[in-house]
């Protein structure tokens, strides 16, 4: 994943025959967010519990920064309270009798009210330090849980389905906040999620699990372009991530975005001009044309080159179209490929209707790492 064993690289290897078969190994680089995805029972949470020290496989090794927390061969198993970890659960797990600030300070080696306030500000909870969990919304409680995890100054941050208990609108806000927060984080982050859209929006890399084994591991783009990985995740459709920058909000309700291949138009995006975004474009929403079409209602026409053509199951074919250094995928029929006589290297135009890009398929792009903020 990275070229060396840099500061706070997380290394995980776990093998077991029971209670579920498990045979997986991966590394997470400093500042990287890796998503563990797969069906229920695939082994995602079991691996997370292994890292946290809540479960010990028959054969395993977990190390951070070259220091082992678990090494079954050497008979080493550092207890959970001595592993410098931050963990955020789906259930928040806050102390109900404590304020937000007190919950955060409970995770500190030395209680520091000023530092607790700083971390709460970092997760957008300014002015709410004195509120108890019952006085906070679900999204605010999850921010407190995240602040508490960061207060440990962890060497690794574990997120176990952290957004599944909140409503869609709150989940979208939390996604944006996690992306913004990552500029301040140097530690490796492991996210367990069943939401493929969430994984694709947030993760740098993905590990797809099935029956305790790794089906595919790689960058998010690589995994989401792999039909075998998609089948293991229980989805039938490819999607590509396309970066763009908000240019202006138009009076007709559309937002113009600037992408590498030209302007894109989407329904109003709640972001200021200059904001960098990533859009998830579903393959079945993309139409291809040999020449630049005219007289269409579709606003987004992107010039590109056929990079590769991948046969799919049934009648479908995945056509990967290079757009500069980016890529978009179109799912069309074999007949269409034959009729258009498409071959790698051919120039084409990809057409995407503005109204087909769902609101939760647009997210802020991670800012450049600050590098000087430490662990929180």
Image (cartoon, helix red, strand yellow):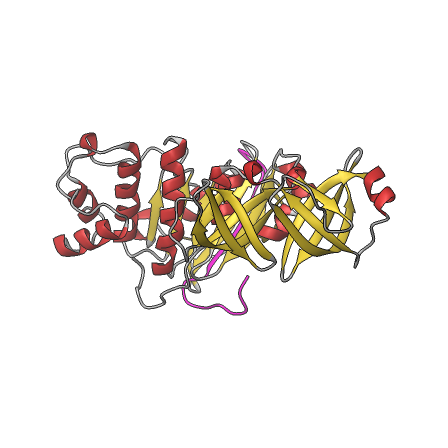
Left/right placement of residue 18 relative to residue 202 reads: right
Choose between 38 and 259: the one closer to the eye: 259
Q: State the quadrant of the C terminus.
A: bottom left
Q: Quadrant of residue 261?
A: bottom right
**Rendering coords of residue 52 (x, y %):** 39, 46
**Rendering coords of residue 49 (x, y %):** 43, 42
Left/right placement of residue 343 relative to residue 132 reads: right
- Whether residue 255 is in magenta: the answer is no
The residue that appears at 49% across and 50% down in the rendered structure is 256
Left/right placement of residue 49 relative to residue 16 reads: left
Q: Main secondary structure of the magenta part?
A: loop
- Labels in figure, total: 0
Left/right placement of residue 95 relative to residue 253 reads: left
Choose between 167 and 211: the one closer to the eye: 167
Magenta-drawn segment: 1-21
- Whether residue 14 is in magenta: the answer is yes
Can residue 58 be seen at all in this image of the molecule? no
Choose between 65 and 336: the one closer to the eye: 336
**Rendering coords of residue 118 (x, y %):** 20, 55
The residue that appears at 55% across and 69% down in the rendered structure is 3
Q: Is residue 163 above or below residue 9?
A: above
Choose between 18 and 202: the one closer to the eye: 202
Can residue 350 be seen at all in this image of the molecule? yes
The residue that appears at 34% across and 60% down in the rendered structure is 184
Q: Is residue 233 above or below residue 24?
A: above
């Amino acid at each position: 994943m990275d070229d060396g064993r840099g500061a706070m690289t997380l290394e995980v290897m776990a093998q077991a025959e029971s209670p579920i078969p498990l045979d997986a190994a991966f590394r997470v680089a400093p500042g990287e967010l890796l998503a563990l995805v797969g069906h229920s029972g695939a082994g995602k949470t079991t691996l997370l519990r292994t890292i946290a020290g809540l479960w010990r496989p028959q054969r395993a090794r977990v190390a951070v920064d070259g220091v082992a927390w678990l090494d079954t061969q050497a008979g080493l198993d550092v207890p959970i309270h001595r592993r410098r970890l931050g963990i955020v659960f789906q259930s928040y797990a806050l102390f109900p009798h404590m304020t937000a600030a007190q919950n955060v300070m409970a995770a500190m080696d030395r209680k520091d009210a000023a530092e607790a306030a700083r971390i709460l500000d970092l997760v957008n909870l300014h002015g709410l330090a004195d509120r108890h969990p019952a006085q906070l919304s679900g999204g605010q409680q999850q921010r407190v849980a995240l602040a508490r995890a960061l207060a440990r100054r962890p060497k690794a941050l574990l997120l176990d389905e952290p957004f599944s208990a909140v409503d869609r609108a709150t989940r979208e806000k939390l996604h944006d906040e996690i992306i913004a927060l990552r500029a301040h984080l140097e530690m490796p982050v492991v996210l367990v999620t069943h939401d493929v859209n969430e994984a694709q929006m947030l993760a740098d890399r993905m590990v797809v699990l099935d029956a305790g084994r790794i089906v595919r591991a790689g960058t998010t783009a690589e995994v989401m372009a792999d039909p075998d990985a998609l089948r293991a995740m229980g989805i039938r459709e490819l999607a590509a991530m396309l970066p763009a920058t908000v240019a202006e909000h138009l009076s007709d309700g559309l937002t113009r975005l600037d992408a590498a291949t030209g302007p894109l138009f989407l329904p109003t995006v709640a972001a200021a001009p200059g904001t960098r975004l990533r859009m998830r474009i579903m393959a079945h929403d993309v139409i291809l044309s040999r020449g630049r079409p005219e007289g269409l209602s579709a606003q987004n026409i992107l010039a590109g080159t056929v990079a590769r053509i991948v046969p799919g199951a049934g009648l479908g074919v995945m056509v990967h179209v290079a757009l500069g250094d980016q890529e978009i995928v179109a799912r069309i029929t074999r007949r269409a490929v034959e009729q258009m006589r498409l071959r790698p290297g051919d120039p084409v135009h990809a057409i995407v209707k503005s109204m087909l890009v769902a609101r939760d398929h647009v997210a802020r792009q991670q800012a450049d790492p600050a590098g000087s903020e430490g662990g929180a």
